[in-house]
C-alpha cells in the first residue's frame, strides 16, 4: 500500500523529533491523524504505535492552542466537548425516518418478492442485504464535508439534536470528503451501538456499583446518546454503522455520481469515505432464493459477531426502482426486515422471593411461569431492588416482557399494563430480614435494603460460599450444598472455620466417605496458596469485584498494607473512585476484619504478593499474549497465570505488539481486530497448551 499519508506520517514524526511542526502543515497533520483513526477505529488495523499517534495528536493540540484561529470544527481535537449539554433541541429530519415491514420466514420473503415483482414488472430483482443492527437509530447531516448535525429518530419526523454526543463516536468521521463526489449536503442514516464486549464491561461496572444491569446493548447505546455530559459519552465507546443515504444536494453543475444509482454503491461510497458501513457484511443477491439462503446463513453467525443484530434488512438494490416502488406512511415498499428468532418472550410473574446476600442486601427475585427464550427455559429473574420494581411498575400476576440478549442474564424489560385484569397485586417489600427478622435499613443514595445483623445466618453462609467460589479461592469440591449443611450442623460458622473443619465429625455425616473427605481436605489446603487478588476478592468487600481486586493486589505486597492506606492514596489507583475506595478504606479500619485476616494468616494462608514468576529465561519470555472468549477447560485467570509462569506477558488489548491471541467461545471484537493484523498468531486452547508444554 502506498497511501501518501504513510510517508507524510514519517515526515511529520521526523519533524517532531527535531523540533515542532510548522503551522502551514496543520491540514496535513489533521489528514494524517484522520487516516490513522480510520485504520484504528474502522479497519482495526493500526499502522502506528499508540504513542506515536499521541505525539502527533499533541502536536496538533499545541498548534491549535498557539494559534486558535487555525481551529476547525472537524479537527480531530474537536470531538471532546468540554461543556455539559443543557437540552437537546427538537429538529426536523430532512426526510422522515420510516419503519420497516417485518418478515419472519421464507414464505414472508417470497410474498414480499412477489409484490415487488408485481410493482416493478420485473421477473427477477436484485436485492442488497445487510445486517439489521440492534441499536438506536440516528440521522447525520454533513455539509461541505463536515458533520454538522446528529439527531435521534424521535417520532420519525422530528428527533432530538444530539450532535455533541454523536461527535464522541470515534467510528464517525467529523470530516468526510463528499465533495469529491460533487455532494454538498447529505443526510445519512445509521445505528448507534455498544458492542458486546464493551456492554459486558459496562454492565459489570454498573453491578459493581450496586446498580441493576441493563437488559441489552441497545438500551445502553440509546441511554448513552442522551447523556448530558459528552465526556461520559466518549468513555462508553459507542460504535456507529451507517447504511443509508436519505437525501443529498449536488454542488452546482455536478452530475449525480454513478455509485449513487444502487444501494450497494452508497454503502461502498460511505465505506470509502471512512464510515463504518456494512461494506463487508452486505451481499447483493439475484432473486429471492439467494436472499433466503443468505439470511439463514447469517443467522448462524449471529453470536460470533462483536455487535448485536436482530435480523437482516433486504433492500431493492436499484435506487431508481426504489423510487418507482415508493412507500406507505409507515414503511418503504422496497425494503423488508427479516427478523431472527426472538430473544424476548412474555410470561406471568407468579411470585417474588426475597434473598439475603452476603452483604445483607435483600434482593427480590421474580418467579415466573417457565418460558423458553432462544433455547433456554427461564423461570426466575432478579428484579434487583425496590426502586426497580416501582419504576417498572411490576405487580404480582402481571404479564411481563422478558429478554435474553445473547449471553446477558435475562432481564424483565417491562410489565404489560394493558393486559391487566384488576387481580394483580402490589409487591410488598419486607421491612424485616426474611431470614433473621432483623429490621432492614437503607443507606442514603442507595437503592438496596440491607439486613445489618452481622450474625444473620443468610449472610454468614453467603460469605463463606463467596469465599470458596470459583472466581475467589476456588476450593473445588466444596459446593454450596455442603457449606449449608456444615453451617446448619454448627461445623462451620465463618471463613476461618473453613481451615479448622473437624473432619472426624464430618466423617460421621451421611454422604461423606473417606475419599471425599480427603479430597475436600486437599483442596482446602491447596487454597491457602491462592494469589492475593483471589483472597481480596473472596473477602467480599463491597464494590470490590475481580477486576478491582487485581488492581489492588498489583499495588501492595501484603494485604494488611491496606490498613495504612488513606482514602486519598487508594483513589490514586486505576479505576478506584470515592465509592470503591471508601468501601476498602472502611473495611480495613474495622477491627473485626483485621482480626479475621490475622486469623487466616495464622492458619497458614498466603497474604503476601507472590514474587512475579516472570522467569526471564522462561520459554515464553519476550512473547505477549491476550485471551478472549470462554476457553473450554481453562479459566482465563489460570491461563494467564500459566503464561506468566513461563515468562510470557499479558497485554490488555489487541495491537501490533501482540504475538498470540488465544480464543475461546464467543470471542468478540478482539478476534476480529486480531485477524486484521497479520503478525498475530491466533490459537485455540489446545494449541495454547501445546505451546506451553514445549
Ligand atoms: P423497526 O424499528 O423494527 O421498525 O425497524 C426499523 C429500524 O431498523 C430502522 O429505523 C433502523 O433504525 C433499524 N435498522 C437497523 N439496521 C438497519 C439497516 N441495515 N437498514 C435499515 N434500517 C436498519
Ligand atoms: Zn438477616
Image: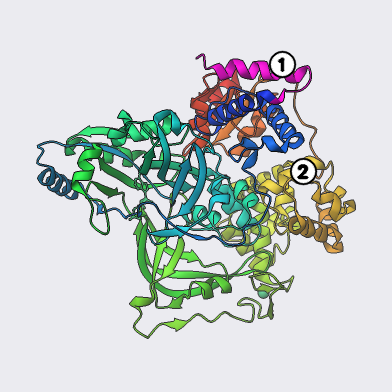
Q: Nearer the viewer, residue 67 or 519?
A: 67
Labels 1 and 2 touching (C-beta < 8 A): no
Q: Earlier in the sequence, mark 1 or mark 2?
A: 1
Q: CA distance from mark 1 to mark 2?
A: 41 Å
Q: Position of residue 112 (x, y in %)?
A: 17, 48
Q: Is residue 683 left or right of residue 22?
A: left
Disc 2: CA contacts within 10 A as few (<14), some (14-19) or many (>=20)? many
Q: Which residue is mark 1?
A: 14
Magenta stretch contains residue 12? yes
Q: Which residue is mark 2?
A: 553
Q: Position of residue 653 (x, y in %)?
A: 61, 33
| Residue at (14, 49) in percent of width and height | 111
> What's drawn in magenta, residue-wise?
1-23
| Residue at (65, 21) in percent of width and height | 623
Q: Position of residue 58 (x, y in %)?
A: 72, 32
| Residue at (40, 54) in percent of width and height | 93
Q: Nearer the viewer, residue 353 or 492?
A: 353
Say which mark, if any, is on residue 325: none
Amino acid at each position: 500500500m502506498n497511501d501518501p499519508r504513510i510517508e507524510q506520517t514519517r515526515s511529520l514524526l521526523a519533524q517532531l523529533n527535531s523540533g515542532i511542526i510548522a503551522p502551514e502543515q496543520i491540514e496535513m497533520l489533521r489528514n494524517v491523524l484522520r487516516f490513522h483513526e480510520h485504520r484504528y477505529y474502522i479497519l482495526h488495523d493500526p499502522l502506528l504505535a499508540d504513542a506515536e499517534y499521541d505525539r502527533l495528536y499533541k502536536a496538533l493540540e499545541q498548534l491549535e492552542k498557539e494559534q486558535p484561529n487555525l481551529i476547525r470544527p472537524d479537527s480531530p481535537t474537536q470531538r471532546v466537548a468540554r461543556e455539559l449539554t443543557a437540552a437537546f433541541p427538537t429538529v426536523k429530519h430532512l426526510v422522515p425516518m420510516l419503519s420497516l415491514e417485518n418478515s419472519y420466514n421464507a414464505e414472508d420473503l417470497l410474498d414480499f418478492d412477489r409484490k415487488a415483482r408485481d410493482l416493478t414488472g420485473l421477473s427477477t430483482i436484485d436485492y442488497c442485504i445487510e445486517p439489521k443492527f440492534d441499536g438506536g437509530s440516528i440521522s447525520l447531516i454533513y455539509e461541505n464535508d463536515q458533520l454538522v448535525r446528529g439527531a435521534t429518530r424521535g417520532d420519525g419526523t422530528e428527533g432530538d439534536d444530539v450532535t455533541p454526543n454523536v461527535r464522541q463516536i470515534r467510528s464517525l468521521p467529523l470530516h468526510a470528503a463528499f465533495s469529491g463526489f460533487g455532494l454538498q449536503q447529505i443526510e445519512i442514516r445509521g445505528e448507534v451501538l455498544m458492542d458486546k464486549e464493551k456492554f459486558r464491561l459496562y454492565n459489570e461496572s454498573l453491578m459493581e456499583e450496586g446498580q441493576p444491569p441493563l437488559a441489552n446493548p441497545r438500551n445502553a447505546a440509546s441511554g448513552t446518546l442522551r447523556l448530558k455530559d459528552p465526556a461520559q459519552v466518549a468513555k462508553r465507546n459507542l460504535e456507529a454503522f451507517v447504511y443509508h443515504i436519505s437525501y443529498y444536494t449536488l454542488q452546482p453543475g455536478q452530475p449525480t455520481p454513478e455509485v449513487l444509482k444502487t444501494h450497494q454503491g452508497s454503502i461502498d461510497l460511505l465505506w470509502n469515505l471512512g464510515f463504518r458501513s456494512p461494506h463487508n457484511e452486505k451481499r447483493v443477491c439475484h432473486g429471492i432464493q439467494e436472499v433466503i439462503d443468505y439470511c439463514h446463513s447469517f443467522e448462524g453467525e449471529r453470536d460470533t459477531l462483536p455487535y448485536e443484530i436482530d435480523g437482516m434488512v433486504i433492500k431493492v438494490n436499484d435506487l431508481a426502482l426504489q423510487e418507482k416502488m415508493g412507500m406507505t406512511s409507515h414503511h418503504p415498499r422496497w425494503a423488508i426486515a427479516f427478523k431472527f428468532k426472538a430473544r424476548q418472550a412474555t410470561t406471568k410473574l407468579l411470585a417474588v422471593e426475597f434473598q439475603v446476600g452476603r452483604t445483607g442486601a435483600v434482593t427480590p427475585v421474580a418467579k415466573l411461569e417457565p418460558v423458553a427464550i432462544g433455547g433456554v427455559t427461564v423461570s426466575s429473574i432478579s428484579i434487583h431492588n425496590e426502586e426497580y420494581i416501582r419504576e417498572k411498575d411490576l405487580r404480582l400476576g402481571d404479564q411481563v416482557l422478558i429478554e435474553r440478549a445473547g449471553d446477558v442474564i435475562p432481564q424483565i424489560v417491562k410489565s404489560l399494563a394493558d393486559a391487566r385484569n384488576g387481580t394483580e397485586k402490589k409487591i410488598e417489600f419486607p421491612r424485616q430480614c426474611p431470614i433473621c427478622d432483623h429490621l432492614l435499613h437503607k443507606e442514603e443514595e442507595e437503592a438496596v435494603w440491607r439486613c445489618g445483623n452481622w450474625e444473620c445466618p443468610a449472610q454468614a453462609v453467603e460469605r463463606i460460599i463467596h469465599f470458596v467460589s470459583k472466581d475467589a479461592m476456588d476450593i473445588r469440591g466444596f459446593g454450596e450444598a455442603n457449606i449449608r449443611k456444615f453451617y446448619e450442623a454448627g461445623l462451620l460458622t465463618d471463613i476461618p472455620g473453613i481451615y479448622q473443619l473437624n473432619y472426624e465429625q464430618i466423617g460421621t455425616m451421611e454422604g461423606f466417605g473417606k475419599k471425599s473427605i480427603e479430597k475436600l481436605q486437599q483442596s482446602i489446603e491447596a487454597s491457602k496458596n491462592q494469589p492475593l487478588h483471589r483472597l481480596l476478592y473472596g473477602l467480599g468487600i463491597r464494590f470490590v469485584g475481580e477486576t478491582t481486586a487485581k488492581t489492588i493486589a498489583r499495588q501492595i505486597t501484603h494485604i494488611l498494607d491496606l490498613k495504612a492506606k488513606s482514602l486519598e492514596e487508594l483513589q490514586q489507583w486505576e479505576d478506584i473512585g470515592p465509592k470503591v475506595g471508601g468501601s476498602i478504606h472502611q473495611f480495613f479500619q474495622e477491627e473485626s476484619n483485621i482480626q479475621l485476616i490475622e486469623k487466616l494468616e495464622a492458619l497458614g494462608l498466603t497474604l503476601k504478593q507472590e514474587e512475579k514468576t516472570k522467569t526471564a529465561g522462561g520459554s515464553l519470555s519476550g512473547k505477549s499474549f491476550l485471551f478472549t472468549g470462554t476457553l473450554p477447560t481453562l479459566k482465563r485467570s489460570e491461563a494467564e497465570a500459566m503464561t506468566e509462569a513461563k515468562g510470557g506477558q499479558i497485554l490488555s488489548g489487541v495491537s501490533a505488539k501482540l504475538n498470540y491471541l488465544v480464543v475461546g467461545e464467543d470471542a468478540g471484537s478482539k478476534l476480529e481486530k486480531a485477524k486484521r493484523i497479520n503478525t498475530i498468531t491466533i490459537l485455540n486452547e489446545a494449541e495454547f497448551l501445546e505451546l506451553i508444554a514445549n
